[in-house]
Image: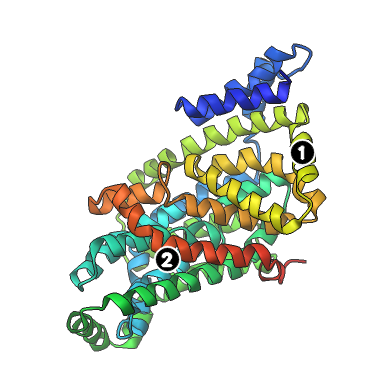
Amino acid sequence: MSVTAAVLTVFVVCLFLSVPISVSLLFSALTAAFVNPRLTCDALFAFRTLVTGLDSFVLIAIPLFILSGNLMAKGGISDKLFRLFAFFFGNRTAGMPIAVIISCFFYSMMTGSGAATVAAMGTMTIPLLTRLGYQKSFITALVAVAGGLGVITPPSIPYIVYGQASNTSIGDLFIAGIIPGIIIASFLMIGTFIYCKRSGEDREKLDANYMELKRQGLWKVFKDSFLGLLCPVIILGGIYSGITTPTEAACIAVFYALFVSVFVYKSIRWKEIGKILADSVASLVTMLIIAASATVFARVLAMIQAPQQFAAFILSAISSKIILLLVINAFLLFIGLSIDSVSAILICTPIFMPMISAAGIHPVHFGIIMTANLAIGFVTPPVGVNLFIASSLTGIPAMTIAKHSVKFIVWFFAALMVITFIPAVTLVFVH
């Protein structure tokens, strides 16, 4: 058996046996030296790579964006954003569910995390829309799917991971992610409108809720949400203008969220910050362990030239770029079913890079395609993290949410096909 076949076989078997992903990656990487002792990828190599793999200024942005997202969620910024969009759309057909989607879109531009978006938006919107007459499973599924926008729109944590793994400009990925995010959000809104038009809505309850918002007045609702709306302008404006790097922007986001939540909205007390920090660290540790292990795995694959072998095999069998893109999408959708997004990106990126380079696919375009595919994995069992977060918020079984999510996943997938086969929507602002 060749070294490449041995490494990949061990990895697949470990996943099948439900071995933790970080252990699977390390064990598979060490298999290479066992099969071919002349290779230098022994235990000492693995340990050194585990340490040096996280020695990156860019990766500092990940814990900072996680912390800023937790601060914003606890600070109630998501609630104020939703009230603003509900003010404008609440009296229209499907207006309140559409306000949920738009709120997820804007909130995702502050956190870069799908899980954080679901947790923050679902906490308020699911109980509210249920009281307004919407089926609880419907609105829970909508929040779970719309939470996927958290990794499509910048500042996306998967974009940071992909940029680091592929040596692609993270700034370019952030620029490229805006229009795909708008396309996906628009498709979800179309699907929601059609569903609500067919199913009907409780107009009496919706009109009463809308009149309550109207009595508060536009100025009060806008004033309450203004600092929340300003956050993505500060974060993305600094990156796009070249004033800040993504890491520096993440640091600014933390201080901004802290200032607004503690001193302006006064929704977070100083004694609560310790728990927010602890929760952020708990969310981060697993991700970093996986990232370090995946770095070892990727370097071993490069050492045995597995990506080049894989690219040569696929390109010899597929000559059409359209078919190649369809195969890549199918493969990534399958990967998203069983592996979390960060692990999938770190594992798949070094394997796919030689292939997309040979096929003439722009690495920024591929990064958006990969992230969008894996975002669908957020709401597909068995790994779908958004499903389990939404389930914890509502008590609805994850599989029930997944069943109701299908109607939205279809629209998400349609948007993915537009992004895949019209590269201009991704690359229009990328130089």
Across and down, in percent, residue 357 comes to 79, 50
Quarter in which the C terminus is drawn: bottom right
- Placement of 283 over or under 41, stated as above or below: below
| Pair 1/2: label in front | 1
Mark closest to the chain's N terminus, 1 or 2: 2
**Residue at the image position 76 percent from the left and 17 percent from the top:** 40
On the question of residue 102 being in view, the answer is: no
Q: Amino acid at mark 1?
A: Phe
Callout 1–callout 2 Cβ contact below 8 Å: no
Across and down, in percent, residue 304 comes to 76, 26
**Residue at the image position 59 percent from the left and 30 percent from the top:** 293
Across and down, in percent, residue 260 comes to 40, 65
On the question of residue 297 being in view, the answer is: yes
Q: Nearer the viewer, residue 335 or 41?
A: 335
Q: Secondary structure at mark 2?
A: helix
Q: Nearer the viewer, residue 406 or 360?
A: 406
**Residue at the image position 27 percent from the left and 53 percent from the top:** 393
Number of other residues with Cα within 10 Å of mark 1, as a class: few under 14, some 14 to 19, many 20 or more = few
Compute the Cα span from label 1 to label 2. Answer: 41 Å
Quarter in which the N terminus is drawn: top right
For residue 92, side relative to residue 304 (left or right): left
Labelled disc at residue 95: none
Q: Amino acid at mark 2?
A: Cys
For residue 373, side relative to residue 138 (left or right): right
- Placement of 94 over or under 407, stated as above or below: below
For label 1, the residue is 313
Q: Secondary structure at mark 1?
A: helix
* Quarter location, residue 90: bottom left
Across and down, in percent, residue 352 comes to 71, 44
For label 2, the residue is 104
- Placement of 224 over or under 65, stated as above or below: below
**Residue at the image position 24 percent from the left and 78 percent from the top:** 201
